[in-house]
Amino acid sequence: MSKKKETVVVAETKAQSVLHEIMSGDPVRIALSILLGFIIGAIFMVVFNDQVVRAWSNFGSDPGLAFSSIWWTIQDGYGALFTGSIFDTNAGNFLDGLRPLTETLRFAAPLIMAGLGVALTFRVGLFNIGATGQIMMGLAGATFVSTRLHMPMVIHMIVAVLAAIAFAAVWGIIVGILKSRTGAHEVIVTIMLNYVATALFTFFLRQPGLLLESNGGGTPKSDHPDGTAMLGSLLGPNYNLHFGLILAVIAVVFYWWLMEKSTFGFRFRLVGHNASAAKAAGIKVENTFVWALALSAAFAGLAAANQGLSIDGGLTTSIEAGIGFDAITVALLGGSRAGGVVMAGLLFGAFKAGSASMQVAGVSPEVLGVVKALIVLFIAAPPIIRALYRLPKPTPKLLEPAKPVVKASK
């Protein structure tokens, strides 16, 4: 074989290897899972739409109407999702048109923060489904500080955020201690603590000396938080977006640095990769579990601060808004990576922001619930997606250590 032909063969082999890595990677599989979820969601919109059913019942007399009804139903449904979550094409001006995007960011911020916490435990080989309870305890801390303590502006907000983080982290430490000292499974413990935290938060709301509104009615509700503790508006009074988005950005950067660049994060990943090997290498696996669950809960505490310090009014137990369980989906969809969690959080934030517009357009908002559930199903079962799209299997990769920081000698 000539040298030129050998060069061509080597180039083709490298190209095939690169293509194999791309097609077998998680980003492609996740993108195809989302696409398939939307396709099946479109089928649900069509099958259960009354106008489409009537048009197809008269298929013999007007087949064009039958086919066009399918197209317009899908276009109206997903078009409403776009105008309700990205850009309102019917708005009077460009700035008003961007309001749906700001709503997506507002809904996505707590999902991203809580999702990072769940993702952290995934990387350590744990399964924290207690974000709901941790958010509840974080809400208790943030609400107490914002309603019962009085401080100068900014300082009051920072203390309230730290209180939310601390209360939530303590709830995570309880799980870590039970896991490391008694061998209790973290799934069972976190499920039970979700109920305990919700009951405790409700109990606190019913106690006049703690969180209860002074002149409240029959429904337990907290006092209004002080204005000095509130997360201020980020873009002015015409938008609902507040500084919770900044907390989410800080959380993402910290998570990326912690898991990808720090020695502490390398220990987390090593324990998650092989706990026995980590223990043989001298890492205290039990202590690592405690730290991981505490930090995971701390991220949930940030989500609690986002919820508790952004509502201009008393808080009720519904303020958690299902974020704790949605965070599991966000972490799973994002592959437990910082960038992936951000993208998954934005997707689910768009679902929340656009659901009302879809309902106005005549599409049941439950369709989005179906789409979310199917996406999670496909993400959790990679063989299904690989079989449907004929994707190659991924090449196993070794765990890379964190890069040590080299200090220059004097």
Image (tube, rainbow, N blue to C red):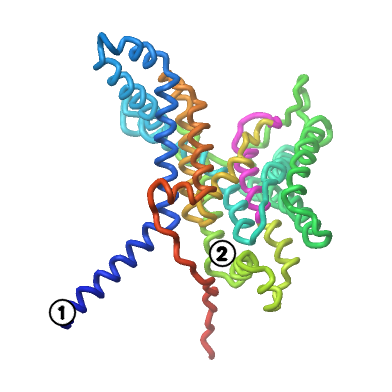
**Dot 1, how many residues are within 10 Å of its Cα: few (below 14), some (14-19), or many (20+)?**
few
Up-down relation of residue 38 to residue 67 (above or below): below
Q: Nearer the viewer, residue 40 or 27?
A: 40
Q: Please tell me whether mark 1 sits on a helix, a strand or a loop.
A: helix
Residue 84 vs residue 183, the one in the foreground: 183
Residue 400 in sight: yes
Q: Is residue 299 magenta?
A: yes
Quadrant (top left/top right/bottom left/bottom right) for the N terminus: bottom left
Q: Which labelled disc corresponds to residue 4?
A: 1
Q: Give x and y (percent) for residue 304.
A: 65, 43
| Extreme residue in the front direction | 1
Q: Which residue type carries mark 2?
A: Met
Point out residue 142 in the picture as x, y percentages from the top left corner. Answer: 70, 43
Horizontally, residue 28 falls left or right of residue 344, namely: left
What is the x, y in percent for residue 295?
66, 57
The magenta span reads 296-317
Answer with mark 1 or mark 2, whichever residue precedes in sequence: 1
Q: What residue is at 71 percent from the left and 39 percent from the top?
A: 143
Q: Is residue 297 magenta?
A: yes
Question: How far apart are the alpha carbons under marks 1 and 2?
Answer: 45 Å
Identify residue type, mark 1: Lys
Residue in the foreground of this view, choosing between 266 and 209: 266
Is residue 246 visible in the rendered image? The answer is no
What secondary structure is the stretch in magenta mostly built from? helix
Residue 259 - label: 2
Q: Is residue 391 left or right of residue 219?
A: left
Q: Residue at x 49, y 69 (%)?
A: 397
Measured as percent of width and height from the top left, residue 106 is found at 51, 39
Q: Quadrant of residue 202?
A: top right
Q: Is residue 388 left or right of residue 151?
A: left
On residue 122, the disc is none
- Give me the residue at 64% from left, 44% from top: 305
